[in-house]
Every structure is written in C-alpha cells, then in structure tokens.
Amino acid sequence: MAKVSAKDLGEQPISKLLVKQAVPASIGILVMSLNILVDTIFVGHWIGSIAIAAINIVLPVSFFIAALGMSIGVGGSSIISRALGASNYEKALKTFGNQITLALLFTVSMVVLGLAYADNIIMSFGGKGAIFDPAKIYYQIVLYGVPFLALCMLGNTVIRAEGKPKFAMYAMMIPSVSNLILDYILINLLDFGMYGAAWATTISYVICFIFILWFFLSKHSELKLNFIHFGLNLSIVKEIGSLGFVTLARQAVVSITYLFMNNILFDLGGETSVTAYAIVGRMLMFALFPVFGITQGFLPIAGFNYGARNYDRVRESINTAIKYAAVLATLVFILLMMFPEAITKMFTTDVEVIKQTPSDMRWVFAVTPIIALQLIGAAYFQAIGKATPALLLTLSRQGFFFIPLILILPKFYGELGVWMSFPISDVLSTLVTGYFLNREIRRELIAKTV
C-alpha cells in the first residue's frame, strides 16, 4: 500500500487520497468488527445465548470509559491535522502530549469508580435475572484493560492525523486477531467460560497498546515528544475538550441508549429480546465498516485542507466521501435485507432468538442507504474544529430523535415500536444534517473561494 505523509493530504487527488486513507481504516474497522462478531459467535456457541446478552450489558459501560480516550484522541487529532496543515509542528506536539496526560487522568479515575459501583451499574444497564452473574464476571475483568483500550483509541486517531493510515489499520487489527486466538484458547480449549472471554479481551487491549507505543517511539512517527509536552496547556485542553466532547457525548448517548434498550426490551420480551438486540447491535458494528472507514478517511483530509485554506479541496472531499459512502451503504442494505435469517443462525441455535431477530434486523437497517450524508456531515464539522454544530448533529440521531421515540412508540405499538424507532430517527437526523451541511458549504467554503 502506498505511503501517505501529512504533506500528501494537501496535494494528492482527493479521490485517490480518500481511497488511500479509507481502505486501511475500513480494513481495520472490518477486522475489529469481525473480532466482535466472531467473539459473539464463539461466546454464543461455547458458553450460551445468555452470555451474549451479558456482554451486551457490559459493552456500553466499558466503551464509554474507553471513549474518553477516543474523544480526547479525536478532538486533539483535529487540532493536529490543522496544525500540520499550517506547518505548526510545536502545537501538534504539545497537543499530543496533552492528549496522553488527559486520557490517563480521566480513564483511570473512571475505572476506579466503575469497579467500586459494579453491581449498581450492571443492574442499571439491564443486567437482571440470569444475565447478572456472567455480566459481572465479564465487567470486572474487562475494566482492568479499559485504560489500555483508551490509549489505543487515542493513539489510533493521532496516527491517522499524521497521514499514516496503514499503521492505524495495524493498530486495529492486532487486538482483534489476538482476541480471537485467545478466545479459542481460553474458552474452547481451557473451558474458562466468561472468565476466558473477559481475559482474552483485556489481554488483547494490552497487546494493542504495546504496538502503538512502539510506533510513536520508532522512526515512523513524526511526533517525537519531550517531557515538556505532557504539561497541560489550558488553551489546548479547552480546544481538545470542546472538540472531543462531541465524540464523548456521542458515546455517552450510545451508552444511555443501551441502558434504555436493554431495560425496555427485557420488560417487553425478556432475555430473548435482549439477545436479539445484542445480535443486531453486532451487525450494526460489523456491516457498516466500509461506511465508517470512509468517514475515518475523510476526517484528516478535510481537517488538513481546511487548515491549509484549500477550500475547493475541502468541498471535493465532502462530495467524494458522501458518494462513496452512499454506494457502500446501499450494498450493505441489500445484503442485510436478503439474508437476515442466515446471519442470525451464525450467532445462536436458540429457536426463539432465531425466530425474532430477522424481523428486528430489517427494521434497524431499513433506511441504511441514506446514513452516509448524516455521518459525513457530522464528521465535517468536527474535522474543521466547529464543535457546537458537530455536537448537535452527532447527537441528533440518538439523542434528539431515537431515545424519545423508544420511550413513546412502545406505548402504542409494543416491542414493534422499539424497532420502528431506528429508521424514523435515521430519516429525521439525515434531513437535519443535510440542511446544516448545505448551509455551511454555501456560507463558508463557496464564499471563501469566490
């Protein structure tokens, strides 16, 4: 794969550059998603369907804490991309050092609190009945590895901001592959059950961290830190916080969504409905990997060229990214509409789960072709450093539309109302994003180019 440097982000053709950035990102997301997918299949067949539900209870909690690292990474990487575009290398270094300091302070503190209130947290997120005990086992062990995961997420975004998508891809692939190998050893061969699943996940996070540490210490990285860079700078911290809060808020809303969904579905359909949601959730992570890859590839291109005042290239990157992502989303939609039963049977042999899940899956992915606009539109505002519109658009789907819908529609349509909420919120959030993105292009990019 051709090498991409920070300078190339402002020079190479946008379509070619987007492919170079998006393909490694997509492969990394694919492998990571396959890891989650296959991990769920292993757990479902080697431990049982209740174990799938148990992991689904824990994921939003652990991912929220890890998202502190990702939010700091994304917020800081937006600054780094624009700083590199403006040839301000000292600001890029100071930002990176501040990112690491902030990530360690926040994630370690959150893990301590998470372990102290483990029982209450698990119950709040729907870990009830037969789900509670396996969920607690998984929760306590995985939380030990979450600070490493947070640093991995942070490092991955910075690697991509440097214009090194190939290494960012490796950083996503390494923990995924190691987790699957450890799953096979600890769950299947050694029969450690939920303990095996949890330790496989935690150890894989540590392995990923070791790789990312090696990258930044090696000659491959342009960002060589000194101790002075780790001292917090108030202006940089504020900028990281304002931009990173977008990502953190999104993950917070995702975690709240899991909280509502698991509890509502448990009340309406018991463990079967929670398991069905867990399977659909895995497909949401896996099936859309190429669309997420395009979004990840788009971020440094838009940020760098905006920082370099190449507004024509920024507009071209928006149009190209939306076009590519829409085509890929449509292909995903076709496959999921055609084969939901076969997909469900990959995860479990539970007859009730197999009966319920395909219909739920069709509802969830009903308007998938239009989500490209929503994802790229929200990402654009984050890439150029406009935190407020980025935050509002990022929260629009789940925060402003989806959560109210799942609280209202089940009162009229029962469990069907839960699944109807997915396509309705997708349509509404896409319309809102399209309006604000079009206004921004006309007012800023076109006006500044003329």
Image: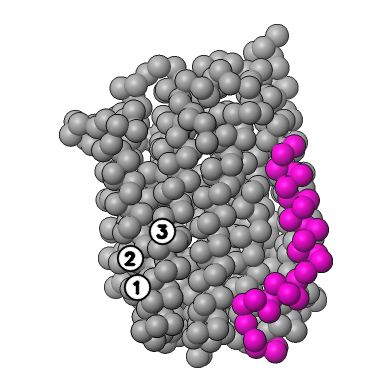
Query: Looking at the rendering, which quadrant does residue 207 occupy?
Result: bottom left
Which residue is pictured at 42% across the width and 49% down the height? 171
* Residue 263 % position (x, y): 58, 78
In the foreground, 331 or 438? 331
Residue 57 in sight here: no
Which residue is pictured at 45% across the width and 34% down the height? 164
* Residue 352 % position (x, y): 70, 88
Mark 1 near mark 2, Cβ–Cβ under 8 Å?
yes
Task: Tell me, for residue 175, which label it has, or none.
Answer: 3
In the foreground, 403 or 87? 87
Q: Please tell me whether mark 1 sits on a helix, a strand or a loop.
A: helix
User: Tag 2: Cα neighbours inside 10 Å, few (<14), some, or many (≥20)?
Assistant: some
User: Tag 3: Cα neighbours inside 10 Å, few (<14), some, or many (≥20)?
Assistant: many
Mark 2 near mark 3, Cβ–Cβ under 8 Å?
no
Is 147 rendered above or below residue 139?
above
Q: Which residues are magenta?
A: 323-352
Query: Looking at the rendering, which quadrant does residue 355 occupy?
Result: bottom right
Residue 87 in sight here: yes
Task: Tell me, for residue 203, which label it has, or none.
Answer: 2
Q: Is residue 110 left or right of residue 405?
A: left
Task: Tell me, for residue 13, which label it has, or none.
Answer: none
